[in-house]
Image (cartoon, helix red, strand yellow):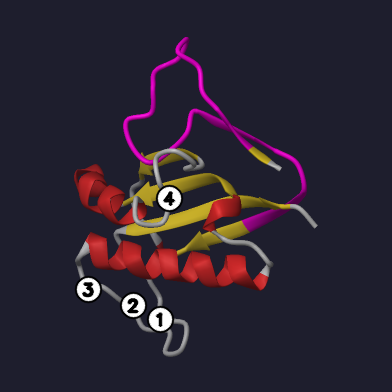
Amino acid sequence: MREVIQTTSAPAPVGPYSQAIAAQGRMVFVSGQIPLDPKTGSLMGGDDVAAQTQQVLANLDAVLKAAGASFADVVKTTVFLADMNDFAAMNAVYATAFNEETAPARATVEVARLPKDVRVEIDCIAVVNS
């Protein structure tokens, strides 16, 4: 069970995320994914944060599927950016996986450095009824 929580007593979301999600079921905690090709181990996307985000989402999707889940089951994400100036480009790709009506809760932070000096890393929590 997954319910979007929305109140006018707090600021409305300004992107593809929800103020909060209430969920009940089996919790799946997906470790942070970076833009590595699962077959070769090579970094994908060069220095393009949008291309990197596409690979990160593909990796998250693969782990979620292995757990019997999908993006629709995700209740929380954390996005780590090497440069907050990349937010708009990352967000545009992120929105292809999560629509604004049912998007999970999200935090986005700029960090000093990410593994292998990538531009983006995303982790998530999903809840699956099973």
Q: Earlier in the sequence, mark 4 or mark 2?
A: 2
Percent position (x, y) of residue 104? 51, 42
Q: Amino acid at mark 1?
A: Asp
Q: Are marks 2 and 1 in contact (CB under 8 Å)?
A: yes
Location of residue 108 with respect to 115 vertically, above or below: above
Q: Which residue is located at x 46 percent, y 89 percent?
A: 39
Instruction: Measure the C-alpha gap from mark 1 to mark 4.
Output: 22 Å
Q: CA distance from mark 2 to mark 1?
A: 6 Å
Which label's residue is closer to the chain start, 3 or 1?
A: 1
Mark toward the viewer: 1 or 4: 4
Whether residues under marks 4 and 2 lie with C-beta atoms below 8 angstroms apart, the answer is no
Q: Which residues are magenta?
A: 3-29
Could you tell me how far apart the alpha carbons at marks 3 and 2 are, in whole angstroms? 7 Å
The residue beneath circle 3 is 46
Percent x, y for residue 100? 39, 40
Which amino acid, mark 2? Leu
- For label 1, the crowd category at 10 Å Cα-Cα, with few meaning under 14, some 14 to 19 and many 20 or more, is some
Question: Left or right of 122: which side holds 1?
Answer: right
Q: Secondary structure at mark 2?
A: loop
Residue linked to disc 4:
98
Question: Which of the two marks, 2 or 1, is nearer to us in this view?
Answer: 1
The residue that mark 2 highlights is 43
Nearer to the camera, 42 or 1: 1
Query: Disc 3 marks which amino acid?
Result: Gly
- Seen at 19% across and 44% down, the residue is 85
